Image (cartoon, grey):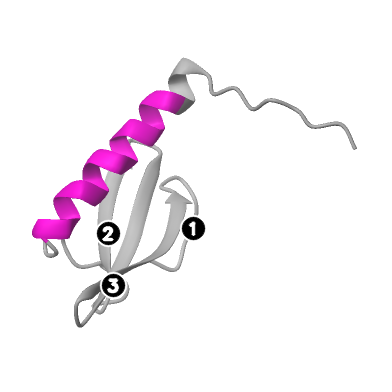
Amino acid sequence: MRQYRISWSPLAEDFEAKIESLLEKLKTQKYLCPPSGKQSSLRRCVIAPQTSLVYQIKSDVIELVAFFDNRSDHQY
C-alpha cells in the first residue's frame, strides 16, 4: 500500500498554533473562556472569527467537546 506524505499549508499551521496556544493556557486557567450561552456546563473559546472550541471541566480534566463554525446554527 502506498503511503502519502502529509503537508500542512501555512494557514493550517497557523490555525494549529492558535489551538496549541489556547490548550496550553487552559492547562493553568481552566475558566479562561466564558460559559456557553446555550449550555451553561460548557465553555466556549473563539479561536478565529469563523471557529470556536467548546470544552467542559470534569474534576481535573478539561474535555474538548467540539470545534464548530461560528457562522452555523450550532447547539453550543
Residue 14 part of the magenta segment: yes
Which one is in front, 9 or 51?
Answer: 9
Say if residue 60 shows up in the picture. Answer: yes
The answer, for residue 32, to whether it is visible in the render is: no
User: Which one is closest to the eye, mark 3 or mark 2?
Assistant: 3
What residue is rendered at 41% in x and 47% in y?
70
Q: Which residues are magenta?
A: 13-29
Q: Secondary structure at mark 1?
A: loop
Residue 55 x %, y %: 31, 65
Task: Give the residue at mark 1.
Answer: 73
Contact (CB < 8 A) between labels 2 and 1? no
Q: Are marks 3 and 2 in contact (CB under 8 Å)?
A: no
Instruction: Tell me, for residue 44, which label it has, or none.
Output: 2
Q: Give the residue at mark 3.
A: 56
x, y (%) of residue 27? 17, 58
Mark 2, mark 1: which one is toward the viewer? 2
Dot 3 surroundings within 10 Å: few (below 14), some, or many (20 or more)? some
Tell me: residue 15, above or below residue 75: above
